[in-house]
Amino acid sequence: MNHIQGFSPAAASALEKIAEEVSVCMQCGTCAGSCPTAPAMDYTPRALMRLLQAGLFDEALHSRTIWMCTTCYSCTVRCPRDIHVTDILGKLRGIAIAEGYAETAGMTFNKAFLGIVRRYGRMFEPELLIRYHLRQEPLGIVGAAPIGLALLQKGKISPLPERLPAEGLAQIRRIFEAVEARRKAAPARPHPMHEVSR
Amino acid sequence: MNPLRYAYYPGCSLTTSAKEYDRSVRAVFDALGVELLEIEGWNCCGATPASQNELLMYALSGRNLAWAEARGLDVVAPCSECFKNLNKTAQAVRADPAVRAEVNAVLGDVSLTGKVRVKHPLEVLVRDVGLEEIRRRVTRPLAGLKIAPYYGCLITRPRNEFDSPENPTAMDDLMAALGAEVVDYFPYKTRCCGGALLLSNKRIALGMTRDLVIKAHQRGANSMALACPMCDMMLDPYQGPALRAGEKPLPTFYFTQLIGLALGIDPDQLGFADRVVSPREVLAALS
Amino acid sequence: MTPTHESEKPRIGVFVCYCGSNIAATVDVEKVAEYAATLPNVVFTQTNKYTCSDPGQEEIRKAIIEHKLNRVVIAACSPRMHEVTWRRLLQGTGLNPYLLQVANIREHVSWVHQDRGEATQKAKELVAAAVERVPLHEPLEPRQVKIAPSTLIVGGGIAGIQAALDIANAGYHVYLVEKQPSIGGNMAKLDKTFPTLDCAMCILAPKMVDAGRHENITLFSYSEVESVEGHVGQFRVRIKRKPRYVKEDVCTGCGLCTQACVLKDRILSEFEMGMGKRGAAYIPFPQAVPLKAVIDPEHCLLLTRGKCSMKCIKACGPGAIDFKQQEEFIEIEVGTIILATGFELYDMSALPQYGYGRYDNVVDGLQFERLCNASGPTEGRIVTKDGRVPEAIAFLHCIGSRDENTNPYCSQLCCMHTLKLAHLAREKTPARIYEFYIDLRAGGKGYEEFYKRVQHEGIHFIRGKGSEVVQDGDKLIVRAEDTLLGKVVEVPVDMVVLALGMVPPKDIENIARIFNINRSRDGFFMEAHPKLRPAETNVEGVFLAGACQGPKDIPATVAHASAAAAQALSLMSRGQATIEPIIAEVIAEKCSACGECIVACPFKAIRMDEEARHAYVVSAMCKGCGTCAAACPSKAIKMAHFTDQQLIAEIEGILGRMSEYELA
Amino acid sequence: MDEEHMLEAVRQKILEIMPQVDGVIALRRVGKGTAPHLFLPGDDLSELALFPQFPLPTPVRIIQAKYPDKRFAVVVRGCDERQLVEMAKRQQIFLDKLTMIGVACTKEQAEYCRCEMPFPKQVDVGETVEGIPQTFLDEFLAKPREERLAFWKHAFAKCIKCYGCRNICPECFCKECVLEDNLWVTSGTVPPPFPMFHLIRAMHTVGKCVACGECERTCPADIPLTILYKLLKRDVETVFNYYAGANPEEPPLMDSTIFLADMDMLHPPRR
């Protein structure tokens, strides 16, 4: 396969691996027929696989599809060619974020979520909600308030984040850094053995 | 025989929005003589956002698994999302030496050999403890409950060694063992609740949730058993917003709350009071 | 290093072949021969233009006699090519044929090297290796076996029937074993056959009758093969005859007992694929061969509960019913075996999303055949379980085929089969008809034309695999993507017909074990060569016919069955076969009975003598692959013609007889 | 638990089990050391010993062969148990006629053996401690190839061909050992040819070696055999996903059906 143009080396390398996986897609549409949100997508999952097969990565990364996935894995479970469609959509979300594609609601959510995990080692929902709404729909927070209050009353929202101890936090931070460093290092073509034992 | 012992990974939700899940898992396992050792200093598995980078997901999950593996314990993870991430990680690390090496390189000070297995509480209860044993311990059969067993999508997907991804039956069998009537909830038992889109595409997500409630009513259920904090978020606090005016709400419970009830554990200890859709009516129907 | 017979000093002749310019263009053949002459025990060397030719062979023959050669090395092409030729040559001179060693200086040297110097050097080394090895060769005696003039055929579907008739007509005896009460197999269940739309039973029934009446065919219906021993030419077969509870020689097939049975129309009929019912006393279908009643021991009240009014006995005029019948075992000896065990439809348990077995009106192709068939349970009317004429029918292709979750292979005939069913549905109902397909595979005589004809009949083709079927009231909703439009469609229908993949029968593993046949990745029996030996197996004298080797439609099955019959006939007409002596042998004193060889043997040719606590090789089943000898940690297995001594001598020859090899 | 308490607990366990078996195979104090001993019902257990350790699977094999109808119990550590499982898969011992009394090794013992899994599946006595991380293997592998070759050359040059490694190994149960066959190993010369002698033995234990380390402890020339055998064991685990001794139900590694299953690994895995 030719080197993929127009992307950072890290993204090109990741896309290349994805393209290799979807090369065996036979376009049967089982994924789309199984997908609960396919009717709301601009490209059905099958059509997205086709974009990837055709090398139209930019279209794929712009698509609404990758942010409409609920990760229910129905497509993956049923794919007759054993393509891990759900995981591929997840990876495309990562590439869209890293490559600076326009921020969608889903993207805001992902960024805020991982930011919090990186900071505390654990989730802290109030901050997630605030960060999400500030960026996407400031008024939405008013709509969320009644349920938020109900949960607060039942003790289901904690007002303060639970942090890991310092040592653990340092480990988490190192994990994030190491993963990011590896992603950026954009390994050359993977060893074929890695491919088959995936 | 040695008592059953597991490393316990509660996950973030079980400390907050799903605290009754946490309480009921602990209470039920305790009552059945299964020992849970909470993983010290556990961290978030990264949930769905971590799937944007497989290595990140493996590493975040792997840090928790390493603690268990070092102690020769298998891991129990009640939250479906955490279970999926942890289990995927364990499977990948076990199957592929290249992945293992990469994950260990990122983890740095801890490492994995791939021996550790991850189990959902359903599997532990049905397989390791056994339905027979649970049936034997029921002191308060759940007669009167007509339960729609709702597994959600992630317990048996993308793959898992203990139940079918299309038509799992473990929870059906478990609820039947408790003396409840189990309604045939296929194919909705694994249908997505929409939870992942709650913030970003609320309308679509609530539509998916509403469908689940309506189908459960159609099948004659008077309650629903859950096994996932995200499904719970949709089907308990957000059930009201999902339903249209005049539509009848359906009380939902974590399956472990129901087991606890049948085993005669004090309902307060199981967190029944924390439910948003009031369970009073249906619990009163318990003969 | 000592020659086999102490008294006999090795006298080796080395013959180096030019192979025209095939070898000589790259290897200095004369230099190789000169070098060979310097090697120990070599008393004669010669070069030949073509060693395999008649004059070439004659030269060797003369040299063997003149120089009293007792070992021969031929440096030429691959032994796969001419080893057998030269072994025969040695035999002609009175020398044991296994005292030959071939050095491959063509495929291993001249064809793969360019540098003449290096190629010549390598050829010398290979010759040296052969010269080192050949003194250690031991004379081996191949065994001749007689081929008994009879064939066992397992399975009485169209494949088994065709092969049986071919062999019986050639004058050899056939034992045809069928596990069901009647022969006919899956073809008997079909309504019409594509693309010609012949009535299936009309073309099959005459063959069934022929097979049932043929003087050279002994038919064992309702019987199974228990065990097989022996080897090509002399297989001893033990056949279990299940009790029919009806005396076959007395029953006239009148059917009065089936009418009288108190369970009449209360048991799902296997022949009707569960769409129709039968009694405990029944005749599977009107054209059954043999046309004899059978009593189902799993349902018969007398046999299960010991209590019944036994109306069948009263109804039977000739008094054929006999509840005292027991299993019977029959032993026969045959020279050849043909397996024609056919196929089954994919078991849907792993694909609950299609609602098969859950929703009444989700059926498979064979069930739909029975609905179409005039002698079927609905007398040919296509109706739903509750008797409605369907307004819409959906056919779903590739269910249990072309799917890594079930069977990765294409079942080949379901496209055409499903098109035919759609055609029948169009003929018999006013329903809207949908075909959900991935690709339409219509490669065959008249197939594409048939596809076009069906398209012309107004059937809706949707290119997209059906993803799931959900019941909604009395409708079934098929969800799929119309991939050509890129839109998800939900089509309400009254009936869903699944084109299920063809799979090996559930008991194929047992059959494979009994006959010691390998299976390929898809689970079907494995042929000896996928292109050139499609009807043979790796067990000599055992052949394959029809869908037991892989999915096939009727024309392909019939052709394959005739091919298997021809193979069996050619063996039997020859009358004898040779068994290779290159096999493994367990040295009992060294064996620690650990069983590593047993699990390692791909041919299941090694067994354990539990009493004496050592393993032993069943020589007729051994293929001489050597896996056991390599697996045995105690070196307690001797592989004839490939002993450790022989192999080490060969290696030492290549390494210039270095006594110790140091790692660099 | 200190040693005396553990011994006492094992004694209790033996007394408990004795009525159901014909004898218990365990270690007995002999002078300063220990030796395998078959304790019969009513025997004095005061000389029962746990350490210094000695692999008991071999005595089990010999005793079971002699008394095929009797039922015995045996005191096992994790490594013993795993060895017995591999032997059972090869018809050398019979698990259905054997009761195991599982003893967990102490922290010190685990460290001494650098044991990855210092406890049997079922622990009757003692408290399980964590396994020792096998980091020394990675450290060894991190060295350059030449250095490792030199290391082994040096180590094996010390071999006096005493066959101690083979004799102590419970998994070496062949009636005739190829290492005594002149075809493979010339008798009367030391050291044996490098590296064939040691590699033949190593390859013959693949899939059954549990890396107990007895060969190294026995070796009078102090050859660091544990590194070799632990590396092999790890390779078997990673390449074939086969854990020696882990599961008596699983066929042995060399099973041709397993081989076929592993061939599947060369293709994208199915769900």
Image (cartoon, coloured by chain):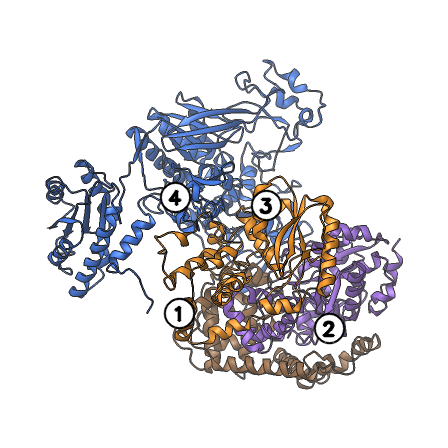
Chain colours: A brown, B purple, C blue, D orange
Q: Position of residue C452 (x, y in %)?
A: 42, 50
Identity, as a three-letter code, of the amino acid under mark 3:
Ile
Discs 4, 3 touching: Cβ within 8 Å: no
Choose the circle earlier in sequence order: 3 or 1: 3
Residue C236: quadrant of the picture: top left
Judging depth in this view, the residue of D45 and C91 nearest the camera is D45
Characterize the local packing of mark 4: few (<14), some (14-19) or many (20 or more) Cα atoms within 10 angstroms: many
> Is residue C554 at least partly visible in the picture?
no
Q: Where is residue D229 in the image (x, y as percent from the top left)?
A: 49, 63
Q: Please give the chain letter of the residue carrying mark 1.
A: D
In 3D space, how far apart are the residues under numbered discs 4 and 3 (Cα atoms)? 48 Å
Q: Please give the chain letter of the residue carrying mark 3.
A: D
Identity, as a three-letter code, of the amino acid under mark 4:
Glu
Identity, as a three-letter code, of the amino acid under mark 1:
Lys
Q: Where is residue D76 in the image (x, y as percent from the top left)?
A: 64, 56
In the picture as drawn, the residue positioned furthest to the front comes out as D31
In 3D space, how far apart are the residues under numbered discs 1 and 4 (Cα atoms)? 49 Å
Characterize the local packing of mark 3: few (<14), some (14-19) or many (20 or more) Cα atoms within 10 angstroms: some
> What is the number of the mark on residue D63?
3
Q: Is residue D1 left or right of residue B285?
A: left
Residue behind mark 1: D153
Residue behind mark 4: C527
